[in-house]
Amino acid sequence: MEVHYPPVDHFFNNSTPGRVNASGIIDIHSEIKINEPFHGAILNWRHGEKTDNGLKIRVKGTAPVNQKVIVNGVIAQRNDTMFTAEIIIEDKETEITATAGDYLGQKSHSIRVIWDRNSFPPRYSLNIDDNIFFLRDIARKKIHLTLRLLLSERTS
């Protein structure tokens, strides 16, 4: 029986997401990434809590397990590979940077968000749901059936 192994460069080329840890195992979660808010997001009062200093928002992302994550100077809460931190943004444009590190070095990920501080409630939005269409169809069928009955009575 012949066993086929993938080529070595399949595991260790530049496109491999991760790095080899001290045990020789590829750690696919070696990168740090901010998932929420997304880069370029325009935030308003609905995305956080307005404070005297600015807007308190929650930043979520992923980072290697067992590494301390700091988001704009705030130590993040950890749950396996996920991290969460509450920060206050004060300026119209804010760069959010999450940094994680260990004895092998530090990695960081930065995004830029915009705070629309002049967005105040109430804001209105108009949505049309599917219910209006089924009620319209019932009304049309009722009219169509009524016309049919009237026409059939005339011809009989």
Image: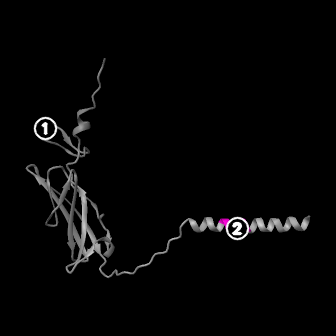
Left or right placement of residue 83 versus residue 144 in this view? left
**Tag 1 secondary structure:** loop
Residue numbers of the magenta segment = 137-142
Identify the amino acid type marked 1: Ser
Question: Which circle, 1 or 2, is nearer the viewer?
Answer: 2
Q: Name the residue under label 1.
A: 23
- Answer whether residue 75 is visible to the viewer in this image: yes
Q: Residue at x 19, y 49 (%)?
A: 30
User: In percent of the image, x 24 and y 38: which residue is there?
Assistant: 11
Magenta span: chief secondary structure: helix
Nearest to the observer: residue 138 or residue 54: 138
Q: Which of marks 1 and 2 is nearer the N terminus?
A: 1
Q: From this view, report whether residue 8 is shown above or below residue 62.
A: above
Crowding at label 2, few (<14), some or many (≥20) Cα neighbours within 10 Å?
Answer: few
Q: Is residue 87 left or right of residue 47?
A: left
* Up-down relation of residue 71 to residue 31 (above or below): below
Q: Is residue 126 magenta?
A: no
Report which quarter residue 1 is drawn in: top left
* Colour logic: one colour
Q: Check the image and report above or below for 88 versus 71.
A: below
Give the labeled residue for mark 2.
140
Q: Write down the quadrant of residue 23 in the picture.
A: top left
